Amino acid sequence: MFIGVLNSFFYAFRKYGNYTNIKISVVLGGVNQKSQVSTLKQGVDILVATPGRLLDLIKQKHVNMDFIETVVLDESDTMLDMGFINDVKKILAKVPQNHQTLLFSATMPTEIKKLALELLKNHVTIKIDLVSSAAPNINQSLYFVDKSNKVNLLLDLFKKQKIESLLIFTRTKMGANKLSKALNEYKIPNEVIHEVVVTAFIQVTGYYK
């Protein structure tokens, strides 16, 4: 069971689940619960939910918590700020005692630490640094440039620094295609890699890794 507050994540979770044999049901507030209840009646392996809607469905006996093995609490700090933690505690009180709880939080204020001690048993803390550092052999530079001059700057860097190979990240697929076209005009060999290209490659070759 996955409990969080971000609707966009729930829809992504359900979308990715379409390509597996795992039955995923998404229940969240702000929409009519009729279709959600209909899906629940078919049985699910993973339930993704907002605290308020899940608690309502439990009270209405549409959700049986007796067979929950794992509970994932995402964005715990946000749920705390939004006042959802009391609902979460009520939900966890209905879960079997031998379940596993995973708690994720972008920040670790005192309240979240207290919550972890209250909800988790013999827990292990895994901390991921927010700031990553580049490898010691990498030099970093920042250029402030207008959007219309980005390609010209890139071409200038090619000439002055004699770059033999380069990896460029763009914000959109369209941007990647436009940049590739501009580089082709200056006879600079390049390849574009993005979702559309990769999908086409897989369809043609049947290769997938």
Image (cartoon, rainbow, N blue to C red):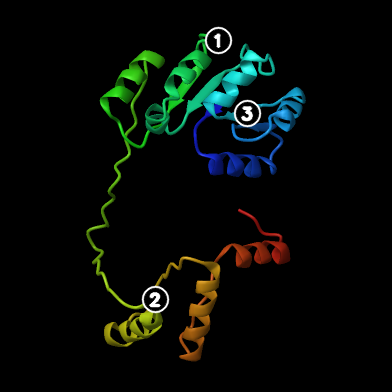
The total number of labels drawn is 3
As shown in the figure, which amino acid type bears the numbered disc 3?
A: Ile
In the image: residue 34, left or right of residue 162: right
Estimate the spatial distance between the alpha carbons at disc 1 and disc 3, rounded to whole Å.
16 Å
Estimate the spatial distance between the alpha carbons at disc 2 and disc 3, rounded to whole Å.
45 Å
- Residue 96's mark? 1
Residue under label 2, please give it: 165
Q: Nearer the viewer, mark 2 or mark 3?
A: 3
Where does the image place residue 82, in percent across and percent down from the top left? 41, 30
Residue under label 3, please give it: 46
As shown in the figure, which amino acid type bears the numbered disc 2?
A: Ser
Question: Toward which corner of the image does residue 47 lie, by quadrant?
Answer: top right
**Alpha-carbon neighbours of circle 2 within 10 Å: few (<14), some, or many (≥20)?**
few
Quick check: can you spot residue 1?
A: no
Residue at the spot 22% in from the left edge and 59% down from the top edge: 136
In the picture shown, does residue 30 fall above or below 208?
above
Query: Is the C-beta separation of discs 2 and 3 under 8 Å?
Result: no
In the image: residue 3, left or right of residue 145: right
- Residue toward you, 138 or 51: 51
Estimate the spatial distance between the alpha carbons at disc 2 and disc 1, rounded to whole Å.
56 Å
Sequence-first disc among 2 and 3: 3
Which residue appears farthest toward the bottom when viewing the image? 186
Quick check: can you spot residue 119?
A: yes
**Alpha-carbon neighbours of circle 1 within 10 Å: few (<14), some, or many (≥20)?**
some
Residue at the spot 48% in from the left edge and 85% down from the top edge: 182
Q: Nearer the viewer, mark 2 or mark 1?
A: 1
